[in-house]
Amino acid sequence: MKGSVIKYERDNIDTDVILPGPYLKIHDYAELATHAMEGLDKDFHKRVKPGDFIVAGKNFGCGSSREHAPIALSYSGIKAVLALSFARIFYRNAVDGAFLLPIEIDESAYKDISDTDSLEVDVSKNEIKNLTKNKIYKMKPFPELIGKIIEAGGLFNYKP
Amino acid sequence: MSRTLFEKIWDSHIVVDEGGRSLLYVDRHLIHEVTSPQAFEGLRINSRKVRRPDLTFATMDHNVPTSDRSLPILDQISSTQIKTLEKNCKEFGITLFDINSPNQGIVHVIGPELGITLPGTTIVCGDSHTSTHGAFGALAFGIGTSDVEHVLATQCILMEKPKTFEIKIQGKRKNPHAITAKDIILSIIRKIGTAGGTGTVIEYRGEAISELTMEQRMTICNMSIEAGARAGLIAPDEKTFQYLKGRKYVPENYDECVDNWRENLTTDRSAKFDKSFTLSAESIVPQVSWGTNPAMTSDVTGSIPFAEEYGKGNPEEEKGVTKALQYMDLKSGTLITDIAIDRVFIGSCTNARLEDLIEASKVVKGKKVSPKVRAMVVPGSQLVKKNAEMMGLDKIFKDAGFEWRESGCSMCLGMNPDILAKGERCASTSNRNFEGRQGAGGRTHLVSPVMAAAAAIYGHFVDVRELDLN
C-alpha cells in the first residue's frame, strides 16, 4: 500500500468528529464519505485521495460504536489509520467490515511522519517506509486472530 | 480456581474456546434504527434468517423527534430509517417497541425497565452505551453494524478475552443528594483517563457503589465506555433482584433464578484482577466538564486549568487543552461557577431515569428558569415520562419554564431536531462533550441532573451542595 499522509496531531479523535451524528441517517456509503472528518477538518473530503493514510495520536476512534466512522473514512479513500493507539470498538469495526487497517505505531514514528509524506506500508513485514524521508519504521504486528480476519477480508469471510 | 464475576459470566457463555479468544453466546440482542439497517440488508442478500428473534428486541430512539408524537415526522430521512426498522422487525419476527408504544424509549433505559436485562447474561447492542446494563451484573457491550449482522445470524460473537479492572470506591459520599453517581463516574474518568480502561472489563466495587440505587448504578456503568472500557459491571445484590421482580420480560421461575444469581454472581474473595484503582468517595464533590472529552473535568469549586498545569510537562496534553479551551471559548483561571450557560439538557441514557428527574425537580420546584436559558427535560422512556407525570414532576418543570418532551436520545447526540446552535453553551446530563456532538459548534458541559437543574435556574453553574435538596 502506497499513499500520502494526512496528519492530525491530536489524541482522542472521536467518532463524532470522524462522522458527525446528523449524517448517521445516510445509507449511501459514497455520500457518507463526503462528510468524513467534517467535525475536525472541513476540507478533508477535498484533500483526501484514494490510498491516503491518516496519522494521529492516542485513542483514535473513541466514543460511539457507529460503523459509519470507519466506513466514511474507507469510502473517502483512506486505506489505513496509523495511530499511537485505538479505541476498541472502532478498531473492531474497521477490521470486521474490512474497511481499513488500524495500525499502531510508536511515538518516534508518530513524531517523525509529517503531513503529506509518502508512505509505503508492508503488513507482511510489519514495516512502514517513509518514501519522502527515506526511513523505515516498525508497526505493531496485528494479533494472530486479527491478522487472520484481515487476511480473509473481514469477519464474514473468516473461517476458523 | 477463584474467579472474578466477569470471568464467571465469560466462562459460562463460551461456545468455542481457542485459548483466550472465544465464540460467546449472546443472551439478549437489543437493536435500534440507526445501526441495524445495513445488518438486515446483509441478512437479506445472503438469504439468512435471524437465529433467535425471541432474544432480539428493538426500539427507535436515536433520531425520533421528542415533540408531539401524533404529528408526522418532518425529516424524511429519519422517517425512512424508522419505517425501515418497522419493516425489518416485521419481516424477521422481532419484538419492536415502536414510536407509539408505551414502552418506547432509549434502548438502555427500556432494557432494564422491561426486565429484558438480567444478571449473569450477555447483552449486545449496536450502541457504545450498552455498558449501562452492566449495573445488573450482565456482561454488556456495544458493537458495530457488522457485528450486529453476525449476532442476528448466529446469536454469537467472536471476542478476545478482555483483562479485568477493579475500581473500588471506598467510604460514603458526604452529601448523596448533591454528590451523585454522575460525579463518581466523572471523577473516575478524570483520574484514569479516556483510555484508562482500554481492553478491560471494569468491575465497580466498594461501599459507595453498594449504597447506590439501581438507577444510579446504571449511570456509573453507562460511562465505562468513556474510559475506553469494553464493559462495566456491578455484582448483583438484593437491590438488583428487587428492582427486576415482576417486570414484563423476567423469567417465569424468577425466584429460582434469584437463588442461582445470589449464589454464583460474585467475585470470589481470592480472585485477582489484572488492574486495580481505588478512590475515596469522601473526596468527591460535584463535577463539571470544561473540555472536549469527559476526562477534562473539574470540581465545581475549581477553575478552568492552565495548559501547562494540566499537561504536567506533556506537550501533547498541553496542546489538547489549548485546542479544547479554544473550542469551548473558555479562559484559564475562570471559576467554574462564573461560566454562564445558554441551554440545559436533562436527558440521555446516562441520566434520564425517574430518580434523575425526581432529584432535578427538587432544585426546580417553585423557581423559574433564568430568562437567558432555554431548558428541556427529555425522559429516558415513555414509562419514565408516565411515572414522572403521575408524580406531578412535569408540572414542576413546566411551571419553572422547562420544556417537557417525549422520550428519545435527543440532544445527547444531535441526530434529531434537538440540537445546539453554533456557539451555544449547554449544561448537559449526557455522556459526551465531544466537539460538535450536540450540534456543530455547540459547547457541552457534562454534569449531574441536579447540577443541570441548578444551572438552568441560576444561568450559571452553582455548587449544589449549597442548596437545600431534601
Image (spheres, rainbow, N blue to C red):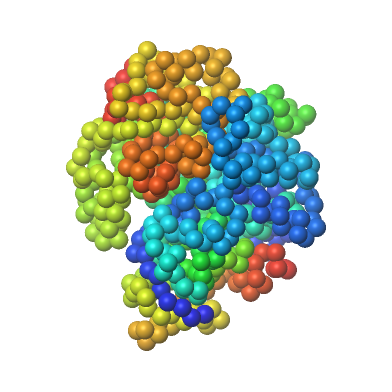
Q: Provide residue B331's location: percent of width, then percent of height.
A: 21, 45
Picture layout, residue B121 above or below residue A72: above
Picture layout, residue A135 above or below residue B181: below
Q: Residue at x 74, y 37 (%)?
A: B95
Q: Provide residue B106's location: percent of width, then percent of height.
A: 58, 35
Q: State the residue lying farthest toward the bottom.
A: A134
- The quadrant in which residue B145 appears is bottom right
Q: Residue at x 50, y 74 (%)?
A: A50
Direction from residue A73 to residue B97 in the image, left or right: right
Q: Residue at x 41, y 74 (%)?
A: A5
Direction from residue A76 to residue B338 in the image, left or right: left
Q: Is residue B414 visible?
A: yes
Picture layout, residue B212 above or below residue B14: above
Q: Is residue B268 visible?
A: no
Q: Provide residue B216's location: percent of width, then percent of height.
A: 50, 31
| Along the viewing direction, whichever of B307 and B137 lies nearer the viewer | B307
- Where does the C terminus of chain A fall, quadrant-wise? bottom right
- The quadrant in which residue B267 appears is top right
| Along the viewing direction, whichever of B34 and B463 lies nearer the viewer | B34
Q: Residue at x 55, y 56 (%)?
A: A68
Q: Provide residue A54's location: percent of width, then percent of height.
A: 43, 68
**Total numbered badges shown on the rendered structure:** 0
